[in-house]
Amino acid sequence: MASEQEDFLFADQEVSHDTQEGDTGFWDVLVVDDDPEIHSVTKLALSGVEFWGKTLRFHHAYSGKEAVASLKNLPEVCVLLLDVVMESDDAGLNVVKQVREEIGNHAVRIILRTGQPGYAPEEKVIREYDINDYKMKTELTRGKLVTSLMTAIRSYQQICELEQQSVALANILDASQAILGHTDMVSFGKAVVQQLAKIIGALDSGLVAGVTNGSRVIIFGGTEHYEEFIGQGLEQLDNGRVIMQVQNCFDREVHQHTDHDITFLLEGKSRKAAIFVEVEQPPSASQLQFAEIFLTNVGVGVDNIKLINELRDVAYKDALTRLPNRANFVDLIAQFYQPGSDDLVFVLLDIAQFSDINNGLGQEVGNLLLLAVKERLCLEFPQSQLLSRIGADVFGLLLPSQLFDEQGFVDTITVPYQVGEHVLTMHFHIGVCRQADFHHLGLETLKLAYIALNQAKQANKILDWYTPDLEEKMAWRLGLIRQLRQDFEMSKLEVWYQPQFSLETNNVIGCEALLRWPSGNGDYISPGIFVPLAEDSGLIVDIGQWVLEQACKLQHQLSAQDIDISVAVNVSVPQFKVNNYAEQVKSTITHYQVSPEKIELEVTESVVMDEVKTVIETLGELKSFGVEVAIDDFGTGFSSLSYLQQLPLARLKIDRAFVKDIPDSDSGAIADLVISLGRHLGLKTIAEGVETQQQADVLKKLGCDEVQGFLLAKPMPKDELLVFLNATDHDK
Ligand code: C2E
Ligand code: MG
Ligand code: MG
C-alpha cells in the first residue's frame, strides 16, 4: 500500500514537472483537505481511472489558504475536491468564494465534501458559487466518486469549449470586421495577416501573396519587414524558407506547416492567395478551425476588393490610355474652381475625322493614334495637369494660362504622328475655357469647354474660347431643337420643291426637295439655321427619312401624271451613320413604287469626307440600285480628287458662292474650273443660286448643263409645283 502510495507521489511529481511543458494528457484534480488520510484514500480510490483517454493527475492542498494559492498557479485544474471544514468551519466555503470572485475562475468544477452532516452549505450558496456536488465523506465510495468526477469533468469540458468558442467567435468577428472596408489590396493584406496572427496566437509578421495571370507569385500585402516586398515577386524575398513554403502552398494546394510558420491557402472565387504567418508555437486544432472560418471571410473580402477595384477602374480609368476618364475628370476638375483665379486654362481637344482612321486603317491603328496623342501631350506639356480621355477621340488637360499659346499649342499637336508604319497628319478642334469661367460643378465646367469646342467645329475653326455669351447661344439652340422636335412630331414641317432647268432646252429636268419650318407667324425659319441643329441633335435622321418619303410620294404622283423629272433630296452626315442607311433608302423607294433613277441624293463634300469608306460603300450600293448621286455645294469643301473619282456620281452642283458675283466681280473662273472638272470626270454640272439672266448666260457659255435659282423658279409647296410643272415644259 505504502509503495503504491509512493508510486503515486512519484507519478505526481513527474506530472507536475510535465505541467510546465503544457502537457494536456491529464485531468488535473486538486484535492483540498486538512486530513492527509483523505488525500491518500482519494488517490487510491481513483487510481487507474481514465476519462476520454486521459488519466487523472492530482495536486494537493491541506488548508483553504493553500488551496487558493495553488489554484492561482494551476489554472488548468478542472475539479476541486474540497473539504468544507478545515482551519475554520467555513474554510471550504471561503475557498469557493475566492475562486469564483477573486481569481475569477468560473470553469473549475467544485465537489464539496464534509465529514459532518451539519456543515452542509445552504442551497443558495451551492447555486451562487456554481458548486457541482456536495457529498458526505462517508458517501465517497470509489463508484460514487468516479461518477461524481466524471460528471464534473464533462461539465468542465463543456464550459471550457463554450468559453473558448465565444472568445474565438468574438475574435473572428472582430477580425472579419477589421479586414472589411479596405479597398486596396495592400492595406487589406496587412489587416489579414494581423488578424490571422491574433486568431492563431502567432507573431504579427507575415505576408499575403497571389498568382498573376503569368503564373508569377506576387506579394501584395505584408507586415513587419515583409512590407518592403509588397508589389514584388516572391522570389525577391530574402528568406528561402518563406519562398519555399508559399510556393509549395500554391503548388500542392494545401496549407503548409513548419515549426516556425504556417502558410494558409486561400481559394477565392476568382483567384488563389497564400497567407504566410510566422508562429512561435503550433496553434491548437481549434485555433486552426477558427482560422478556417476567418479565411472564408477573407476570401469574400478578396473578391470584394477585386470587384471594388475593377469597378473603380471601370468607373474612373480609361482602359486604353490608363488616363482618368470623363467621370474621373469631372470629379477632379471641381477642385480647380477658384473664384478670382485665372491661372489655368482647360483645353479640350477633339481629333477631327478620327473615325476615318478607325474605318480606313483599322481600330488597332486608331488605338495607337490615341496613345500617340497622349504621349505627345505628356511629352510636350509636362506642366499640364489632369490629362484625361474624356471621349472616344477627346482629350482634356489643364495648362498654366501663361504658358498657353494658341498657335504654339496647335502647331505642337499637329506635327504628324508616327503610328506603326503610318505617318498621320491629324487635325483637331479645340475648345478652351479660362479658370475664371470654371463652375463649381465639374460637369458644368466640362460643358463650357464643350460649348467652345462645338463652336469651333461649327465655325470650322481649329480653336475657340468659351465666352459667357456662347452659353446663351447654346441655350437658344437647345430651345430651338426642342421646338423643332415637337413641331416635327406634330407634322408641322413642310417640304417645298425648287425646279431645276436644262440650260440647253430650258425645260425643267428635276426639282430639289427643301425643308421648310413654319415659325407660326407666317414666316419660315431658314433650313440654314435649323438643319445644322437637327444634325447636331440627331433629329435629322428621322426628318431626313420623312423628306425622302415626301419626295417618293411626289415622284409617284409625277409619274402618274407622266411628268418625267427627277427629285433631289439632301442627305446629312448623321443619316449615313445609321447602320442600314442604303437598305432603308432602297426599301422606301420600293415601297412607293418609284423608279430609283428618278431619285437623286445630294451629299455635300463634308458628308463624303466624314467617313470616306462608309460613304463610298453606301453610295455605291445605292448607285447599283439605280439612285443618282450629286455633290452639293461643290467647291466649298475640301474634297480630294481621288475620293471624288471613287464616288458613283452623276452631277456636281456648283455652289451659289461661285455664281452670285458673276459677271460683276467674278468672271466665273471657279465655275469654269468646276465645269471642266465635271466634264473631265464625265459628270453633269448644275449651278445653284442663279438669279440673273447674265449669270445663266455666262454659265451656259462655260458649258454648264443645268441651273437652279430664283431667276427661273423659287422653292414652292408641292401643289404649286404641280401647277407650275403643268404650265411649264419639262423633259419627258
Ligand atoms: P442646298 O442644298 O444648297 O439648297 C439650296 C439652297 O439655295 C436652298 O436654300 C435654296 O432655297 C437656295 N436657293 C436656291 N436658289 C437660290 C437663289 O437664286 N438665290 C438664293 N439666294 N438662294 C437660292 P434653303 O432652302 O434655305 O436651304 C438651305 C440648305 O438647307 C440647303 O442648301 C441644304 O443644305 C439644307 N437643307 C434644306 N432641306 C434639307 C433637307 O431636307 N435635308 C438636309 N439634310 N438639308 C436640307
Ligand atoms: Mg441641296
Ligand atoms: Mg447647295
Image (tube, rainbow, N blue to C red):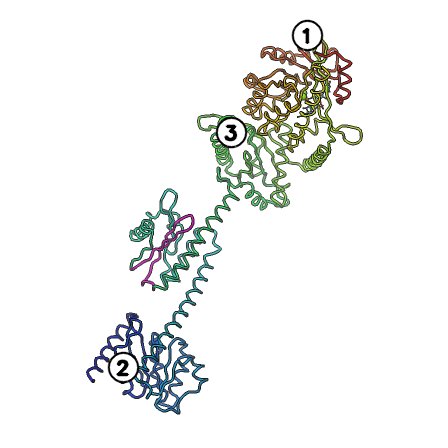
Find residue 663 and report its image quarter.
top right
Q: Which mark is residue 701?
A: 1
The answer to whether residue 635 of the structure is visible from this angle is: no
Q: Badge 3 is on which residue?
A: 358
10 Å neighbourhood of mark 2: few (<14), some, or many (≥20)?
Answer: some
Q: Badge 2 is on which residue?
A: 43
- Classify the position of the N terminus by image quarter: bottom left
Front residue of 681/409: it is: 681
Find residue 579 and report its image quarter.
top right
Residue 407 pos. (x, y %): 57, 29
Q: Which mark is residue 321?
A: none
10 Å neighbourhood of mark 3: few (<14), some, or many (≥20)?
Answer: some
Residue 366 pos. (x, y %): 50, 30
Residue 280 pos. (x, y %): 32, 62
Front residue of 17/581: it is: 581
- The Cα atoms of the two marked residues, 3 and 2, are separated by 94 Å
Which residue, as the protein is rendered here, is positioned at the far left? 3
- Please, what secondary structure does the residue beneath circle 1 have? helix
Q: Is residue 410 magenta?
A: no
Which stretch is magenta?
Answer: 259-284
CB-based contact (under 8 Å), mark 3 and mark 2:
no
Closer mark to the observer between disc 3 and disc 2: 2
Residue 235 pos. (x, y %): 32, 47
Where 166 sits versus 653, above or below?
below
Question: Is the shortest distance between ligand 1 and the CB of mark 1 under 8 Å?
Answer: no
Q: Is residue 270 magenta?
A: yes
Q: Reading the chain from its start, which is encountered first: label 1 or label 3?
A: 3
Where 429 sits versus 9, above or below?
above
- Please, what secondary structure does the residue beneath circle 3 have? helix
